[in-house]
Image: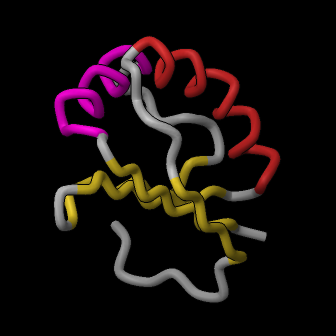
Amino acid sequence: MAVCRMYDVAGATLEQYDEVDSKLGPEKPDGALFHLAGMLEGRLQVIEVWESSEHLEAYEKQLGPALEDANVPDPLVSEFEVHKMDWVK
């Protein structure tokens, strides 16, 4: 079952996001379906959809060290199973 994870990161900047992004590289991670990032009222928002929780957990092993290196604050995380996903190329 596909999983959507949303991160609300108060105190993070787009520069920190770009630093993490450059460390992880341009390759799409195994099991990743969708990734979106931007600012909302001064807070970094990241939304991702993954094929499964297992794919997400595997990717977090790479993501964690990159977030620490960039001094990204801990996010508020929400997650749910995807019922429907449309309009994605």
Residue pictured at 69% horizontal, 45% vertical:
56
Left or right placement of residue 29 versus residue 40 in this view: right
Residue situated furthest bottom in the rendering: 83
Q: Quadrant of the C terminus?
A: bottom left
The foreground one among 58 and 68 is 68
The foreground one among 32 and 80 is 80
Q: What kind of secondary structure does the magenta stretch mostly adopt?
A: helix
Magenta region includes residue 22: yes
Magenta region includes residue 3: no
Above or below, 81 relative to 63? below
Quadrant of residue 18 in the image? top left
Residue 2, percent from left and from top: 70, 68
Above or below, 58 relative to 8? above
The foreground one among 85 and 89 is 85
Residue pictured at 60% horizontal, 25% vertical:
64
Residue 40, percent from left and from top: 21, 65
Above or below, 13 relative to 84? above
Residue 49, percent from left and from top: 55, 61
Residue pictured at 18% horizontal, 66% vertical:
41
Residue pictured at 29% horizontal, 33% vertical:
17
User: For the magenta stretch, what is the residue range?
Assistant: 12-24
